[in-house]
Image (tube, rainbow, N blue to C red):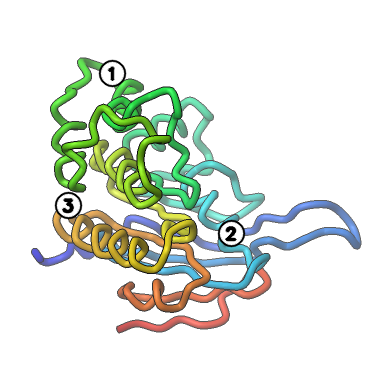
Amino acid sequence: MNQVDTKRIVEMQGIRRHYGDGVSQVKALDDVDLSIQAGEFVAIVGASGSGKSTLLQILGCLDRADSGQYLLAGKNVLSLPEKELARVRNEVLGFVFQSFHLLGDRNALDNVRLPLEYRRGKVETSLAEQMLERVQLSDRVKHFPSQLSGGERQRVAIARALVKQPQLLLCDEPTGNLDSRNGQQILDLLSGLREEYQTTLVLVTHDTEVADRADRVMTLKDGRWSKESSR
């Protein structure tokens, strides 16, 4: 693996996200700071309701913090209008979800091509084909999601996320719907691709064995950091 750039891709300070008012208010995130260096693999763990999904939503520019600062690749994304945020999501970020989120009426190749269709200029089909080959699905390009196993569907989702060559890949319980064998294969694939493409990886999980694969593990409890460990 080449030497990792020490530039910070994520810099969060004082992030707060609250829901409701008065006595019923829920502090999903309460004054959270987070720094992530380019090329780093960070796992965020915590019990249900700890705030980890909310944090991932804000990291992915799918939700906005109520207050605080969030610099993504040096850009203050909390101040951007929605149109600019959509561009950031398409050009800087990649997403892999527990439930795959593939379009059932599109085959594997078309699902992987989808993010490129929102970019300006000609869509290069060859990029999607190359990425499906990289995740060992070159013989499944014309298969629809219903014709694929859970592990294969997650591979398509990974190919779709990485075809954009994102600077930051966000994974929300990527092995949650898979058996242990397929789960390990997906983790091996993510780890290998992250090193190959020098992509920063943030993975949210409740599984400590999954988290142990990361360079750094951070634990959320009641909207605040409770522990951090590195290997």
SS of the residue under disc 3: helix
SS of the residue under disc 1: loop
Left or right, 2 with respect to 143, comes to left
Residue displayed at 36% across by 63% down: 183
The three-letter code of the residue at mark 1 reads Arg
C-alpha distance separating marks 2 and 1: 33 Å
Which residue corresponds to mark 1?
Answer: 120
Mark 2 or 1: in front is 1
Q: Which mark is residue 197?
A: 3
Left or right, 42 with respect to 193, comes to right
Q: Which mark is residue 15?
A: 2
C-alpha distance separating marks 3 and 1: 23 Å
The relative height of residue 93 versus residue 211 in the rendered view (above or below) is above
Asked whether 130 or 227 is in front, the reply is 130
The three-letter code of the residue at mark 3 reads Tyr
C-alpha distance separating marks 3 and 2: 29 Å
Residue 114 image offset from top left, x and y in percent: 34, 26
Q: Residues within 10 Å of mark 1 (few under 14, many from 20)?
A: few
> How many numbered circles does the render carry?
3
Labels 3 and 2: the sequence-earlier one? 2
The relative height of residue 5 versus residue 128 in the rendered view (above or below) is below
The three-letter code of the residue at mark 2 reads Ile
Q: Residues within 10 Å of mark 3 (few under 14, many from 20)?
A: some
Residue 197 image offset from top left, x and y in percent: 17, 52
SS of the residue under disc 2: strand
Label 3 close to label 1 by CB (< 8 Å): no
Labels 3 and 1: the sequence-earlier one? 1
Asked whether 133 or 27 is in front, the reply is 133
**Residue 157 position by quadrant:** top left
Residue 134 image offset from top left, x and y in percent: 15, 46
